[in-house]
Amino acid sequence: MFYADAHCDTLYAIAVDHKPAHTLDITVDGLKKMGAYLQTFAMFAGSGGPAGEPYQHVMDALQKSYTLGLPIYRGAMPEMPPTDARGILAIEGGEALQGSLERLDEFANEGVRMITLTWNFENEIGTAAAVSPDGGIKDFGKRLIGRMNERGVLCDVSHLNEAGFWDVMELTALPPVASHSCVRELCNHRRNLWRDQVRAIIDRQGFIGVNFYPHFLFEGNPANVSTQTVIEHIDELVQMGAIDSVGLGSDFDGIEVHPIDLHSPTDIPAIFEGLKKRGYDDEALAKIAGLNYYRVLSGTLEE
């Protein structure tokens, strides 16, 4: 089966935090063992926000991508998914652009194909859900999204507040992505998506990657979160109509706690064993495992 993960923080963990390989959730050897696998490496702008060094953090991660030891798609992707392990680049935290459309072009030329517009701060683009539900996309953000449309760079609305989310739905000409978010009806966390937000992404043929972070999956003790909890969020999204829009957004190497039985990509097949027991057929499993995400990527990247 082909698997795709829409979000991890592994490049930042290696290039900026200098974490040794044996402490990482994702390793190149582990990805290669999975066979056909597409990993999105989100280059994190850093927890310092706009006042930190967001551009430099992303540049450090970008340079590391060239020596990672894994093929990275840096241009148009083939129509069919890979048969081996490969990567694609994204940015988490639009403050890395520092209010410059030229920076967007610079990153797009290096192969960046998705930008999480905010992290947990307000920046030149908009406001994070962690700050306030109010305050939509700013003037620079509107110009940025217009340019992202031209360059085939996807808007990632994970972390973005509700007002900004609805602005993006109007501004983006590309399928919107929530690369690592869960269902708010199941876990009432401000980082998660309400049903009407889910429906808006579905209606625009976008993508939602279910996050593995226990605090986004369950409001109680994280020790009670398992693969089954992830399955419940996937199943809920499917019940909302997202069979062609749901997939995985692990947040590996960006989360400090994990579901008790989900610590690396090699644990992911258990999700699909559980879905199969719930009656999902092979076609549905293949869509959720990776084909839904690959459809969005391969259909929008510029030549």
Image (cartoon, rainbow, N blue to C red):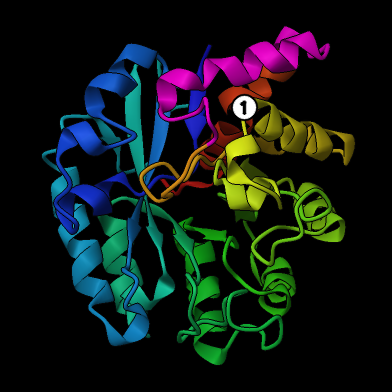
Name the residue: 35% across, 49% down.
9
Name the residue: 56% across, 26% down.
290
Q: Is residue 115 left or right of residue 73?
A: right
So how many labels did they put on this image? 1
- The residues colored magenta run 259-282
Q: Is residue 49 shown in magenta?
A: no
**Which image quarter is the C terminus in?**
top left
- Which amino acid, by three-letter code, is at mark 1? Thr
User: Percent position (x, y) of residue 278?
Assistant: 81, 14
Q: Secondary structure at mark 1?
A: helix
From the viewer's side, name the closer residue of 33 and 21.
Answer: 21
Q: Is residue 267 shown in magenta?
A: yes
User: Percent position (x, y) of residue 259?
Assistant: 54, 35
Q: Is residue 221 above or below residue 193?
A: above
Asked where in the image residue 286 lies, by quadrant, the reply is top right
Q: For mark 1, what is the residue?
A: 227
Q: Is residue 168 above or below residue 284?
A: below
Name the residue: 54% across, 41% down.
249
Q: Is residue 248 above or below residue 144?
A: above
Asked where in the image residue 214 lies, by quadrant, the reply is top right
Q: Is residue 240 left or right of residue 77?
A: right
Callout 1 environment at 10 Å: few (<14), some (14 to 19), or many (20+)? many
Name the residue: 42% across, 25% down.
265
